[in-house]
Amino acid sequence: MSELNANSSWMESPEDGNIMLELIRNKDWSQTSLGEPEHWPRSLKVGLDIILHSGYPMFIWWGPDLIMFHNDAYLPVLGQKHPDALGQSAREVWAEVWGQIGGVVENVFRGEEFHARDLLMYLGRKGFMEETYWTFSYSPFRDDNGAIGGLFCACNEESAKIQQQRRLSCIKDISSLSARYRELPALGEATIKVLEKNARDIQFSALYLRRDDGLKFDLVAGSKIMGSAETFPAELQPLVGEGDEDCMIDHLQKSRQIVIADDLEQVLEEVRHEDGKPINSVAMVPLLKPGQQEVTGLLLCGLSPYLEMDDEYKNYLTLTAAQISTAIADVRSFEKERKKEIALARSEKRFREMADNVPLIIWVTDKTGRCTYINKQWGIYSGQSESMWKDFGWLEAVHPEDLEEVKTNFQYATETRTPYTQNYRLKDRAGNFYWHVDSGLPNFDENYQFVGFIGAVFNIHEQKVAEEQLKEKEEKLRLAAAATNLGTWDYYPLDGILQWSDICKEIFGIPVREDMTYEKFLDALHEEDRERTDLKVRAALQGTEHYDIEYRVVRRTDGKERWIRATGQSYLNDKNEAYRFIGTAQDITDRKLAEEQKDDFLRIAGHELRTPLTSIAGYLGLLQRMIGEQEKTRPFLDKCLQSTLKMRSLITDFLDISKVERGELSFKMETANFSAIVKDTIDNMDLAATRHVLDLHLEPDLYIYGDEERLEQVVVNLLSNAQKYSPKGQTIKVQLSGSKGRIFFRIQDQGIGMQQKEVEKIFNKFYRAASGSKVKGMGLGLYIVKKIIDYHNGEIRVQTVPGKGTQFTVEFPEIEPS
């Protein structure tokens, strides 16, 4: 224990580099309610010793005034509040959030604990109210008398993580837009809607594209502006920068960097945040042509008044603009290609001459969707003449199972004037159906009026068959994985994408719909295995080690610990970087438990086998010294006999289990009087020695087809268990009855009983119930009993109540005596 735990001598002890310890020593504490340090409670000194030497952000609020103490790791949390925060009341230091946490603090001083994860709090630590996120816990801190004297907190800032997650999600959504939208206005509106979902970073936004003359930027789309009825100007007017007469747009085009404007009045009326706070800053982000430095537009963004314009914020805006630029370039490329196709379609004669000489099926429709032209290849393939395929006659060649879907999709494309693509089967002139892909583009005249579709049909039958075969193989693999409860995962390290199968998530106790990350995977691991597993993954990604590892996870859904075996293979690109890492995960908890039970068995077996032999040797030694004293010799002979019989029983179990595993356990099957077997077995057992009371109800002359010796073994084992697990003097009920061609044999004790989860395992080899861990045994008896009963086409069931007892019920088919 260091100096803080003893007297005030810690004030003079050297502690180089510990900022807060030095400030505590030098502060005049006489001006606070705590007074001089020599009068501080010892518990407070102990707590200060802990937090001051910790690298994790921690603080203590002490006494009714909530006097604040904190360590060096907490200084970034305070920001500009340092160094004044030391010794002040927490109510004053964190006045801006006291309405949020004040009630919680009061509850902590009543003895409650509080835990928060990713909690949003607005802190004034940087000169403005900053949006931050925190994971922390409040715990009562007791004084020297055991009363609650203060509050202890360990915390961690999650702001960067939360902000990065939502920003990456926004960028990902924007990146997918170009695949769905083929016109700039629609793309612009969709982009703005995506940005509106991330209003914490971008309060409002407007997308402008530069005119061909490069002089002005025209509005494509803009979001709704909170607190203002003003719309964005159709043309963006120049903004005068601070201390510079140059146009800010000119500056943006020259620097190709983000330009921040702190005066919106020249563009918009006053705009406010959703909570009423004015938004005074706007960012103008250049949209650069992909792969070039040419400015093709700009993104106007209302900046959050609760965020600092740091590198991460700027990078997010830059990446967002880059994704928008790529989407715009894709749409423009598509429009350019579409115009080329339109120009080609205007020359009808040239088009038909070309179409009739290509090895593809080319078709044209009018604006209603009626077919007006199909090249010669269609007649060669289908055998249809022009009178047969004209208008909608070509649909006669479509497979009946595909017909309705083809009609619906083509009608939708015609009504919406959007590109059309459909896979379906077409009948050839011999009556055979083959898979084709039919693709069409809307056709516009010189006035950009829609006049119909131009399309082509490609034979993809071989490709389709190969795809179906691949799907069939994948389905077989999926079923095989499901049958073996084998989870699969696929990790793309360069993109940070981790995909898990449903089985894999079930093994780890993670909801099926939850997206996975590598960090979530590490968090699910047992803390003792986390670092080892991470190093193993990194080695596999470098290609230096084969990935085959066993580790523990703590399931999130139920908190249970499970053992997992994972194997995987990484794939490296030409830069020796792992671009993909795939593998499997399997729950091996039962195997691990079996290994532990095996170890327990070997330990117990050694003891159990030695104890009878030791007794035999001891009693025989006494007999040697008592030769001639016949009356005294008999009890020792009995003891020797009992130990010998016990040894024989253990050896019999060993032999039986060995035979069971080899499938060599022999049975001498014949008609047997099971009632007589039960009665004789009970008569031969020494129940008086354990002082148990037997309550017998045995129906006579119940016959079974079986092995008398093995059936006796069942009765002995079940009755012996009832003796071992019941207190001496308790009643053991034994009932034998017959009904409707079945024999029911029940043994009920008043012993310690079992937990329900143990019932499912008690017939496993080497398993011993935890509730009976003090009772001698090796966990073999019930395993062998179950095998014997199964061989006789019988059943065994267990009913148990912890602390009240257990009942075993054995059921056999009854036969008529021969």
Image (spheres, rainbow, N blue to C red):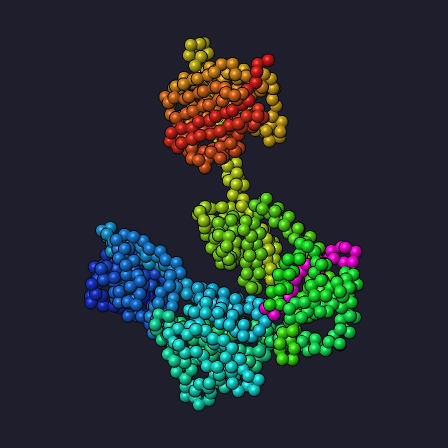
For the image shown, how many numbered marks are present on the structure? 0
> Residue drawn 32% across and 53% down?
113
Q: Is residue 771 left or right of residue 10?
A: right
Up the image or down, 324 lies above or below 800; here it is: below
Residue occupying the far bottom of the picture:
245
Q: Is residue 352 left or right of residue 328?
A: right
Q: Nearer the viewer, residue 361 or 772?
A: 361
> Residue drawn 49% across and 46% down?
562
The quadrant of the picture occupied by the N terminus is bottom left
**Quadrant housing residue 544:** bottom right
Up the image or down, 153 lies above or below 588; here it is: below
Q: Residue 506, how many percent across, how many down? A: 51, 49
Up the image or down, 268 lies above or below 65; here it is: below
In the rendered structure, which segment of residues is drawn in magenta? 416-436
> Residue drawn 56% across and 67% down?
176
Q: Residue 788, how many percent across, how many down? A: 56, 25
Q: Nearer the viewer, residue 353 or 217?
A: 353
> Residue drawn 33% across and 70% down?
124
Q: Residue 648, how many percent across, how many down? A: 53, 22
Q: Residue 135, how many percent across, how many down? A: 38, 60
The quadrant of the picture occupied by the C terminus is top right
Q: Is there any visible trace of residue 524 in the rendered image?
A: yes
**Quadrant housing residue 354:** bottom right
